Image (cartoon, rainbow, N blue to C red):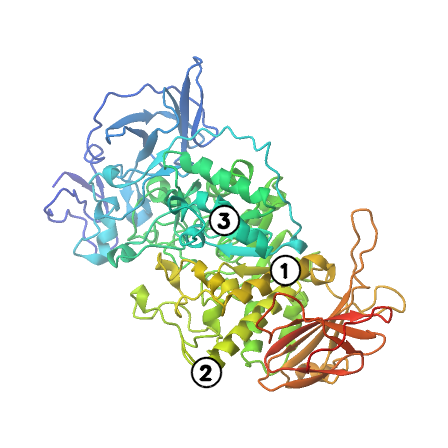
Amino acid sequence: MEAVEAVPRPNGLRTSPPPAVPGPAQEQAPGTTPDPGAAGGPEPGSAPRTVWPGSSEPLGARFRTGPDGRPGTNFALWAGGAESVELCLFEADGTETRAPLTELTHEIWHGFVPGVLPGQRYGYRVSGRWDPWTGARWNPAKLLLDPYARAVDGDFTLPSEVYAHVRDWPERQIADTVRDNRDSAPLVPKGVVVHDDDDWSDDHRPKTPWSDSVIYELHVKGFTKRHPGIPEELRGTYAGLAHPAAIEHLTRLGVTAVELLPVHQFAHEEHLERAGLKNYWGYNSIGYFAPHSGYAAGGTRGEQVGEFKRMVRALHAAGIEVILDVVYNHTAEGGELGPTLSLRGIDNRGYYRLQDDPRRYADYTGCGNTLHVVQPHVLRLITDSLRYWVTEMGVDGFRFDLAAALARSMHDVDMLSPFLAVIAQDPVLRRVKLIAEPWDVGMGGYQVGAFPPLWTEWNDRYRDAVRDFWRGAQHDVRDLGYRLSGSSDLYAWGGRRPYASVNFITAHDGFTLRDLVSYESKHNEANGENNNDGTHDNRSWNCGAEGATTDPGINTLRRRQLRNLLSTLLLSTGVPMLVAGDEMGRTQGGNNNAYCQDNEISWIDWSLLDDPDWRGLSTLAARVIALRRAHPVLRRRAFFSGRSQTPGGLPDLTWFTAGGQEMTDDDWFASSHTIGMYLSGDDIPQRDAQGVPITDDSFLIIAHASHRPARFALPGHPWADSYELLLDTTAEDQSRPPGTGYPAGGSVTVPGRSLLLLRALPATTTPAPRTSSH
C-alpha cells in the first residue's frame, strides 16, 4: 500500500490505511489524501503536445485558426477548486497523449493545441484533494468527459473502474471514501472536437404561436424503429425521423411540434446493465451539448451533429417545430456511490448541491444528485447549452424535466430564482417555447400554476380531471369545467394566457391511452423490480376485463373511450399534447413505467394503422386537429370571461345542464356525469394582424360519462336556430362528420359514454336533413 497522509476525521472513523486488496486498484484509507504522484493512471504513451496559452473563452473545445495562422483547437474547462488539469488526446488505437493546461483565468483552465482537428477524441484528468468528508472527490485516474463536448464517441457502461471510489469495498458505509486509482480511460467514451460552420440561412423556423400549437411527444428510436417505410439502416435514428415516411405521418396527423424525449448524451444505470436492460427514455444526461450518439446512423466522430441538424431542417420544412425534453436537474453520476464520469471529478462541490454532511448529496430529483443551479458556472453551463441548441442546432423550445428543482435558490422553490431570472432576460431563450414540468420530489416541489409569464406548464390537474370524468369517478363537474376552459384558476394571473396550460392525458411515463382503458393495475414485471416501480395512482378503468380480451362488447367500449379521451383533449382550451402512438392504439401491455424497455414494449407498432379495429383512431385525431386549426374559438388566446364582449351579444362561454338550462352554482356542486359547453364564435377577444376582430362559428360540446343514454335539451334562441352534428364518438367510422341537423330548442339523445360536437347555426343556414336516430 502506498504512503498516505492521515487527515483527522469524525470520532469513531479510522484514519489509518485499510489493508491492501488484491487487484490493480490502489485504495486509500477513509479520510486520507494520497501522495500526489501515486495516482493518475498509466503514463501517456506518446510525446507531449505543444500547448499555447489560448483563451478562456468560450468554454469547451473550439476548432479555430491559431496565432501562427495554422488550424488547431482551443480547450477551456471550468474547474474552480482543481490543482491541475491535463488534456488527454486519443488516437484511433487508444494511445493517449497528455497535455497539461497551465493557464488559469477566472477558474478556467485553458490552452490552444496546434494541429488538433475536428474528429479528435479527448477527455480530461483533473487533480486535487481526495477528501470526500469535505466533498472533495478529485481523482486523476478517471478520464472525464468535457461538459461542453459537442459530440461523444462511444456509449457509457459502468464497470468498476469508472468509479472514483472502490465500488466493492467490504465496509459499504465508507466505500465512497476509499479512492480507486485504476485508469478508466479505456472504458469510457470520449468527447469529440466538432467544427460548427452552419449558419442556418436556408432554414425557416415555423414559429407557430402557442395558441395554434399541437404537441406530439415522441422518442427518436421508438417512433422510427419499426416503421416499414423507413430503410432499416435508418430506423431508430435522427436520420430515420427526418425520413419522408416519418414526416408524412406527422403532417397527416396535423401536429405542429414534436417534443423529443431526451437527446442529450446519456448513460445507462448500473442496476439496469446487471439486469440486461437499458435506460430507454434517456433521463440520465451526462453531456448537455452532445446529441446522443446511440441515435446516429452516420457515425459518432461528430457526424451525429450534422445528422441532428438535417433532421431539424426536414421537420422545419414540413412546418413542424422541434422541442427538446431536457434534464438539467441532475446527471448520470448519481449519489456518492455513483460513477465519476464528468462533473463529479471536475469539481464535485462546485457542481452539485451537497447536504450539511458534504459527503452526501441533496436529492430533489429522486436520481441521487441535484445540480447546484445557484452557482454561476452551473447556471452558465445550462444557459450556454440551451443557447447552443437554439442558435446552432436549430431547435425551437424546451420542456424542462423536474423544473422546480431548477427554481430552487437555497432550498425552497423560488420563482425569483437565478435560473428563472436569467431565462426571463435572455434575448435568445425568452423567445423560444419554454415548458415546465412544474414539480420535483423535494419538499414544496409541487408548483403547478406558479411558474412566471413566458412559461407554459404540464398541467397534471387536467390529466387527472379528464381521466376521472371518463372513468366515472367524478361525482360533479366543477374541476372538469376549469380544465376544459383553460384552467383559469391556475393560470389567469400575471398576464398569462390559456396556452400556459399544456393539456395532456398521457405522457411517456404512465399508461398509454389504450392501456388507460384496458388496465386498472400496472403490470411492470418486465422491469425486474417485482412490479414495485411505477405509480399506483393510474386513475384508469379497464372497461370490464384486465388486459387483452376477445369480448367484443368490451373492445368496442374501449375504442369509444379512446375516442372520448382524444376528442376531449383536442377540443379543450390550452395546448394539447399527444403521445406518439396513442392515435393508433399503442399498448405497452399494462407497463406504466417502461423507462428501461428498449424493445417492442415501447417501440411503436405501425401495423396498427392497417388494423381495422384501430386505424379509425388516427383518422379521428387528424379530423379533430383540423377542426381545431380551422376554428379560432377552439384555440383561444385569452381566457373566457363568461360575459359578452359586445352589447347585446352572447357570453363567450356558457355552461348547460342536460335539461338545457344555464348552470347555476348549485349545478356545479350537484352529482352529474353530463356537461354542455357552448363556445360563442361572436365573442372572441382576438384580432388579426391588421387589427380586424376575429369571428368564428359557435359550438356546443356535450360530454356524457354515464353508461346510460341521456336526453340533452339543445339551447334555443338566441344561442342557435339549429345545430349540425360534427362529431359523435360512438361512431367507429370517423372519416367524415355525421352532418345530422337538429332544431334548437329540441333535444338529442346522447348515447352512454360519448361526446358530441355540434355547430350552432343561425336562421340563415339550412342544416342537413336529419338522418340519425339521435
Tag 1 or tag 3, which sits nearer the N-term? Answer: 3
Q: Amino acid at mark 2?
A: Gly
Placement of the N terminus among the 4 image quadrants: top left
Q: Quadrant of residue 661?
A: bottom right
Along the viewing direction, whichever of 403 and 672 lies nearer the viewer: 672
Q: Position of residue 323 (x, y in %)?
A: 54, 49
Disc nearest the viewer among 3 and 1:
3
Q: Which mark is residue 245?
A: 3
User: CA–CA distance between discs 3 and 1?
Assistant: 20 Å
Q: Position of residue 35 (x, y in %)?
A: 20, 35
Is residue 549 visible from the viewing direction of this image?
yes
Q: Indicate left or right for 550 with 310 as reference.
A: left
- Give the left or right position of residue 194, taking residue 164 as reference: right
Which label's residue is closer to the chain start, 2 or 1?
2
**Of all residues shown, which one is farthest toward the right?**
647
Quadrant assignment for the C terminus: bottom right
Residue behind mark 2: 544
User: Mark 3 vs mark 2: which is more N-terminal?
Assistant: 3
Looking at the image, do the residues carrying marks 3 and 1 touch, with CB atoms under 8 Å apart?
no
Residue wearing tag 1: 625
Q: Nearer the viewer, residue 165 or 119?
A: 119
Residue type at the position of mark 1? Ile
Judge the density around disc 1: few (<14), some (14-19), many (≥20) Cα neighbours within 10 Å.
some
Q: How many marks?
A: 3
The picture places residue 612, in percent across and down from the top left corner, at: 49, 68
User: Residue 311: which numbered mark, if any?
Assistant: none
